[in-house]
Image (cartoon, rainbow, N blue to C red):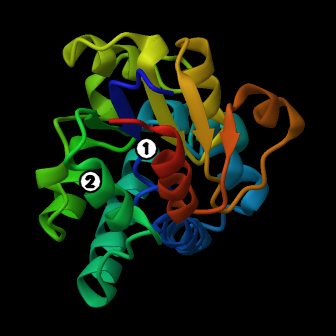
Amino acid sequence: MKDIKLIIFDMDGLMFDTEKISFRVWKEVLDRYNYRFDFSIFSKMLGSNLSRIKDICITEYGIDFPFDLIVEERYALTNQIIKKDGIPIKEGLRELLEFLKPLKIKKAVATSSSRYRVNMFFAKTDLYKYYDYILCGDEVSKSKPDPEIFLKVAHKLKCDVKNTIVLEDSEVGITAAYKGGMIPFLIPDMKKPNKETLDKCCQYFTSLLEVKQYLEKTLTY
């Protein structure tokens, strides 16, 4: 832990408390078209980019599923909710970022969400100033659990993977970090981790405040 050079943050469910919004939006939109939707389906989507989510939907609902139309309505409803209620920031995020700010550790976001979604969320916060780089799900060819997105971030910032912590809330994110040879920290959101995921993570926390407290004790800069 003394040689950490980079910390990569997931976004949805890790930085922003948006998974509850996402589940609500999927449910409302699919109800309009009489498609069954529950948490068992939603849990498969967690941490995935749009391409992988489309594959999941086709598997669940068939080749005729109107994915593009559903996505368009999802975006519209999400925008309405965020415009009305704002974007809820996860407990401890600001405190963790402020703690890391003076340290010689680079910080990045590697999210399965699209650049459009990232720009929308970050435009409503002041979090851009904390990060050295942001890479989005529509800017890589493979979705988590493939490690491509994390490896590209580490390469861009010229940091060795063995000196890189990844903060993730999803099973596919932890798997991607593990496959990439990084140090996975799990902070789960809506879905409780299974044993396989727990075995892959180096540390398990219930909030980003706990991450901050842990790093305060273990980092020596």
- Specify whether 101 is left or right of 66: left
- Against 130, residue 210 (above or below) is below
**In this rendering, which labeled residue sits more in front, label 2 or label 1?**
1
Residue at 56% across, 23% down = 176
Q: How far, Cα to Cα, is label 2 from label 1?
A: 13 Å
Q: Report the front residue among 8 and 173.
A: 8
Local secondary structure at mark 2: helix
Q: Quadrant of residue 184?
A: top right
Which circle marks residue 117 in the picture? 2
- The x and y percentages for residue 116 are 20, 49
Looking at the image, is 105 positioned above or below residue 11?
A: above
Report crowding for label 1: few under 14, some 14 to 19, many 20 or more residues within 10 A (C-alpha): many
The local secondary structure at tag 1 comes to loop
Closest to the observer, 57 or 158: 158
Instruction: Look at the image and tell me whether residue 220 can be seen.
Output: yes
Residue shown at 58% from the left, 60% from the top: 210
Residue 139, x across and y down, in percent: 26, 26
The quadrant of the picture occupied by the C terminus is top left
- Crowd class of label 2 (few under 14; some 14 to 19; many from 20; radius 10 Å): some
Q: Is residue 125 left or right of residue 209?
A: left
| Mark before the other along the chain sequence, 2 or 1 | 1
The image shows residue 27 at horizontal and vertical percentages of: 60, 70
Mark 1: which amino acid? Asp
Residue 179 location, quadrant? top right
Residue under numbered circle 1: 10
User: Depth check: 33 or 26 in front?
Assistant: 26
Please provide percent x and percent y for residue 38: 74, 63
